[in-house]
Structure formats: structure tokens, C-alpha cells
Amino acid sequence: MSVTRLTLFVTMTLIFALMPAVAASPDLLFQAGNKAYLEADYQKALSNWQQIENMEYEGAELFYNMGNSHYKLSHLGMAILYWEKALKISGEDDDLKANLAIAETRLTDQIEKSVSLPVWGWIAEIRSIFSDQLLSVSGVLICLLIFSIMALRRWVVLGVIIQKMLKSSLVALIVLMMLNLTLILLQVRDEAAARQGVIIQHTAEILSAPAEGTGTLLFTLHEGTKVSVLRGMEGWYEISFGSSKQGWVTADKLGVI
């Protein structure tokens, strides 16, 4: 074989070897999914986007689009699952919240709303405004300001009026730091308390024990219902719904957010 033919052979081999990798590029798959969605081929769009998800790529836009496709295909549970995943990544998003609000009108199961003091509602609203990153950065800045003021009062000769102003500022900053730490601790507690999940099949029987045939049927939940995931074991999840309902569901009927 001549050098020219050998070079051509090696080049073609490399091209064919790289073609699957190029075809499976997340960007190309995402664009192909968008094109299929615009053509109303929602199943094909999902197929492309699921390949991206299988590569362990995550993104609010990806999950948002997947939720939209599932909704178009009347997969209510899967639509809510992916919209919730997108919301978890993006935080506040009006489009996602609007979609979830529409989907909630189609739910069969309605959670019992507990009565709480107004102050807890205000705290929840404040916590929803600040992201984890913002709380961390603001906490560091407040600490720096506190140490700066303490250094000024200790090492720099200042007038009485300025000393009083610095003292008042120091008290205010300490109060802000305590509030900042409180919000961080509350967020950590809530995140650690329980994961969230969504029923993704038409109905799901909730049993008293993680064993089919031996566990007692406690209640039934329906597609799209959001629950708290307490723990998991092989093939099962222990979940809670509302303030008093708790039991086990098979893993194939629950999507974890």
C-alpha cells in the first residue's frame, strides 16, 4: 500500500470513528430536539434531549423543554417532574411557575394545607428571594464590614460622634449577620429534611412496607402528585404526602426531583 493510500485510509478511519461522537454532540442533539419540537414531533424531540440527559448534562432550559414535550404528549407526571427539576436549577422563573400552575389544575390529589402563623409565610418569602450564593457572599461582606469597623474603633483615634455612629452601624451589621445565618440554616435544614418527588404513573399504591403482597395498602396517589421522599432502598421509596400520610411506593412510579 502506497503512502498516499495509507494516509487516506487512516484519515477515513479517523473520520468514521469520530462521526458517532460528533453526532452525539450535546449542542447538535439540543438543536435537533428544538427542530423536532417546532415540527410538533414531540417524541423525537424527547429522544434527542434524553440522550443529552443520559450524558449527565443538566440545565434548566433542557429540563424545561423536556417538560414541555412531555406535557404535549399528555405525560402529566413527567412534565411536572422536569419542570420542577428546571425550577430547582433556575430558581425564580415566571414561565416555569405558570406551567406548573396550569398543570396543578389537572391533579387528582390535593394536599392538605396546614395553617401557620403569618410570620412563617414572611420568612418563607424572604428566603425565596435570596439564593444560596447571594447569602454566602453577603455573609462574607458583612463579616468584613464588622471587622473593619471594630478595627477603626480600636486602632484609629476618632471623635465621639463618629464613634457613636460606628457603634450603631456595628450593632446593625451584627443583626444583619444573625438574620443571614438564620436564613442559611433554614435553607440547609429544608434541603436536608427531604427530597421531593413526583408520581409519574397514572396511579401509585402506597403500602405500609416495602414488599408487594405483604404490605397493607394505605392510600393511592395519582399522576403528577408531588411528595416528600424520606428515604430509599432497592426498588422502593418511603414518601410522605401532606401532614399525616406516609408509606412506601415502588421506584418505577416515582421520579425524584
Image: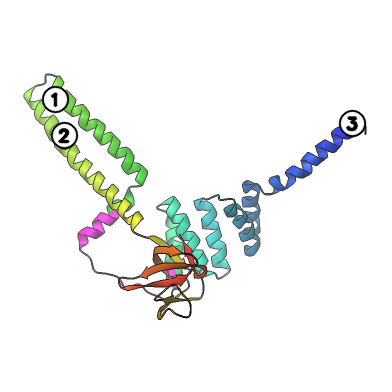
User: For the view shown, which residue lies furthest in the left direction?
Assistant: 160
* CA distance for labels 2 and 3: 78 Å
**Tags 3 and 1 in contact by the CB under 8 Å rule?**
no
How far from the left and from the top, in percent, is residue 94?
A: 42, 56
From the viewer's perspective, tell me whether residue 217 is left or right of residue 57: left
Name the residue located 35 percent from the left edge and 55 percent from the top edge.
Answer: 192
* CA distance for labels 1 and 2: 10 Å
* CA distance for labels 3 and 1: 81 Å
Residue on which the image places disc 1: 153
Residue on which the image places disc 3: 4
Residue on which the image places disc 2: 170
Name the residue located 45 percent from the left edge and 80 percent from the top edge.
Answer: 214
Q: Earlier in the sequence, mark 1 or mark 2?
A: 1
What's under tag 3, amino acid-wise?
A: Thr
From the viewer's perspective, tell me whether residue 89 is left or right of residue 141: right
SS of the residue at dot 1?
helix
From the viewer's perspective, tell me whether residue 78 is left or right of residue 126: right
SS of the residue at dot 2?
helix
Q: Is residue 132 above or below residue 111?
A: above
Q: Is residue 240 above or below residue 192?
A: below
